Structures are given as C-alpha cells and as structure tokens.
Image: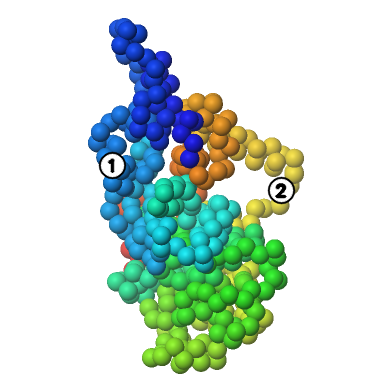
Amino acid sequence: MPGGQYQVMSTKFHHSLYSLTDSSDAGPEDEEPEAPVRLTPLQKLTMDMCKDEKTIKELIIGRRVGFYKVRGEIGQGTFSRVKLAFNALTKDKVALKILDKARLDSQAHRLLSREISSMESLQHPNVIRLYEVLETPSRLYLVLEYAGGGDLHNKICNEGKLSDNTSKITFAQILSAIKYMHNINIIHRDLKAENVLFTSSSCVKVADFGFSTRVSNRSVTLDTYCGSPPYAAPELFMDECYLGPPVDVWAMGVLLFFMVTGTMPFRAETMGKLRRNIIKGIYTLPPWVPGPCQRLIRGILKPVPAERYAVDQMLGCDWLLPVEFPWSLVPPEPTNALQSLLESECRDLEEEEEIRSSLEELGFTTQHLQNNQLNDSRSPVTGVYRILLHQSQKRRGCDSPPVVRGMVRDPKREGLRAYRGLRHTSKFCVLS
C-alpha cells in the first residue's frame, strides 16, 4: 500500500503513513516558535502511527491494522479468524476477517479471490459489505460490515423455531438478497443458517462468499461440489454438471424448513443415508406449519431442478404477500423517464456531496481523492469512503427490515410488535 499518499499537512513534519521514520529534513537550527497547528483526525492518526510509541507497538503486535483498532475474536472458520475492530477515524465497528497466508494453498487462494471479487460487486441491504482489504507480509485482512446480532443457526439453537411472522420477515430478506445476486449472475453456493447474520435492528445479512462464483449467464452449468451437505441440492450428489440458481433455491428451502420447525428436513446417521434422503426428497413437514408456508416449502424442495420454484415464484407466493419492504425490490417503471433520471442523479449527487464533506472533516484532501478513485478495496481512503457511504444509506432507511402488514414498530423498544385491536385498545403485544 503506497504510503506517500498520506502525509501530515503540517509545514513542520512530513510522515509517511506506513513508515515509522520522520522524513522531515528540518534541523535544530531551523526550529523557531510557531503557533500550534490544529491537526485533522487523519493527520493526528498518521502522526501517531509514525511517532506514538503505544500506537507503534499496537501495530507491531497486531492490535492495530491500518486504520483499524483490533479487539476480541467473534468467529472462526477453516482458514480464518474473525475479530471485532473499529475504524479509528469514523469509530464504526467492523468485522475483521484474518487469513494466515502460510495456511492458504492454491485452492484457498482461488476461493479468496472469488470471495473478494463477488463482494466488490455486491451492494444490497441484505448482503454483508466489504469495506477494505489490507495485506501484510504474513496476513490478509478483509474489513467487513459488522452485523452484531448473531447468526440464524445460533438463534434457533438457543431460542427454538421462529414465529410465523418472524420467519416471513427473515426469509423475505434472504430471498431479496439472492434475487439481487442472481440478477447480476452471482451464485452463492453455500447458503446455510450459519451464513445468515442479523444486525442489532434485526436486518438480515447474507454472508460468506468463499464458494460464490460469477457466471456469464444463469444458464451456464457448474461442476464443482461445494457447500454444506445438509443444505446441498440433490444434483450436487450426482457427479453431474448443475445450474447455479436452483442450488441456491434448494438451500433456501432447507433454511425455511429450519426456521419454521427448528429442525432440519434431511437428517441421517451416515452421509450415505443423508445423500439418499436428499436425492429422493424424503422429509416430513409437521402438520402445524401453516398451509401457505407448507406449499412454499414443497414447491422449493423438489428433487428435479426444473420443477423447483424459481425466485420470482417464491416472491409472489401467498405466504409472503403480507411482507412489505421499506425499499422496493423492483424499481417502478418511471412515468417520466427523464424526470426519474434527474431525480436519481440529484439524490446521488446529494449523497456524494454529504460523504465528501465528511471525508474533508476527517482530513482527506482533494489530492487524496484524486489519487484514489474510491473503487480500489486495497486503499484505506476507499475503506473510509465505503463506511461513510453505508452510514449515509442507513440514515435513509437502507438497513431497515421489512414488516408484515398488521405489525408496527414500537418506538420505545427495539423489535417488531403485533398490532391488535386499534379500535378497542392502544396496547402493543410482543411477538414471540
């Protein structure tokens, strides 16, 4: 990462952000009393990283990485650890995915490259965001959006099955994310409850794109088996080429079954029995699952991919009809194309102006922004920009979860409430 882009804009000192030496050529004879210069947050951080002993020590021992202060571990994977961190300039919490280069073989490198490539293309309220990529001689760091509300697997294991309305709200958001991904020809291929995260406001975030792939179009066949066996579609067990979208759809059916029953549809003592059950589509739906939800599950968990529900069929099913998103899944057709374009450009310009103003307050100059096109994930300027952009979008309601008609938000407490008997009472009842 080039250090010369980040210099303290003082007439007295010139520090390279990632160099621990003072590059000033001022000698003792040049020193004379000066009025104290008020440093911007970026200038102060830069100076601390070059001169402050405590900050330098934290950088050396890994308690700091780039602009991020690293805290405790929040997760662990096959090749990675995930730690909580926060950006020293914006103060936002992030999830820091740490990969040890020495443990990455050629296949792991390919998967990591795909993960970064996929995440660079994704910007959706229900998809976890990539802010920045940092690299040291021994490690690679992915700076990701911090969800903070745990994952779906732990939630169900600890609290039991979800209520019907909570299942609708959760599943609708997963479906929204997958529709968006498939529209831009990205296939997830590892959908499972552990990869469905929640924010503190109950917004769903689909995560972990290590097995994702981009296809030229959705009719392109794939041949790599990947994912978790209990969520794997029948065609993945048949050693044949398969289409990507139906594989994600099948996994969504397994997720929905798990949400509404608290158990997995396909269970067996051995992998061989599990494989046979999945290929034959053998599962039992409890009779107490609502009829519209049962029909949706049966439409998804069809062993033949061509007979399986498509994403748009799922979106239009009876069970999801009461779900209302705070933002449109499909932009409406503009009545006046030119007016719509102008309004969109005005909103974009307003948002861009707001973010650039925030960057300037932190100390990023016009030169910084000219040297960084804000689309290179390996630049700390891009990292701060993306965090500020997400902040702005959240203020506009981007990360608000959908609601089910007949439910409203209690302004005094987090969570969704059931709205009952408006004509007779003003009380709100908490949903289980």
Amino acid type indicated by mark 1 = Glu
Closer to the camera in the image, 386 or 320? 386
In the displayed structure image, the side of residue 311 where residue 432 appears, left or right: left
Q: Is residue 41 visible?
A: no
Q: Is residue 314 above or below residue 385?
A: below
Amino acid type indicated by mark 2 = Pro
Question: Residue 146's spot in the image, x, y percent?
Answer: 39, 52
Q: Secondary structure at mark 2?
A: loop
Question: Residue 361's spot in the image, x, y percent?
Answer: 43, 27
Applied colour scheme: rainbow
Q: Residue at x 44, y 47 (%)?
A: 134
Give the number of marks.
Answer: 2
Q: Is residue 240 above or below residue 173?
A: below
Q: Which mark is residue 257?
A: none
Q: Residue at x 36, y 60 (%)?
A: 81
Q: Is residue 400 above or below residue 161?
A: above
Question: Which of the two discs, 2 and 1, sits closer to the camera?
Answer: 1
In the displayed structure image, the side of residue 114 where residue 74 appears, left or right: left
Question: Which residue reaches farthest left?
Answer: 54
* Mark before the other along the chain sequence, 2 or 1: 1
Q: Residue at x 35, y 72 (%)?
A: 156
In the displayed structure image, the side of residue 329 where residue 416 appears, left or right: left
Q: Residue at x 31, y 14 (%)?
A: 36
Q: Secondary structure at mark 1?
A: helix
* Residue ID for mark 2: 334
Question: Residue 249's spot in the image, x, y percent?
Answer: 57, 74
Alpha carbon separation for disc pair 2 and 1: 53 Å
Q: Is residue 333 visible?
A: yes
Dot 1 alpha-carbon crowd within 10 angstroms: few under 14, some 14 to 19, many 20 or more:
some
Quadrant for the C terminus in the image:
bottom left
* Residue ID for mark 1: 58
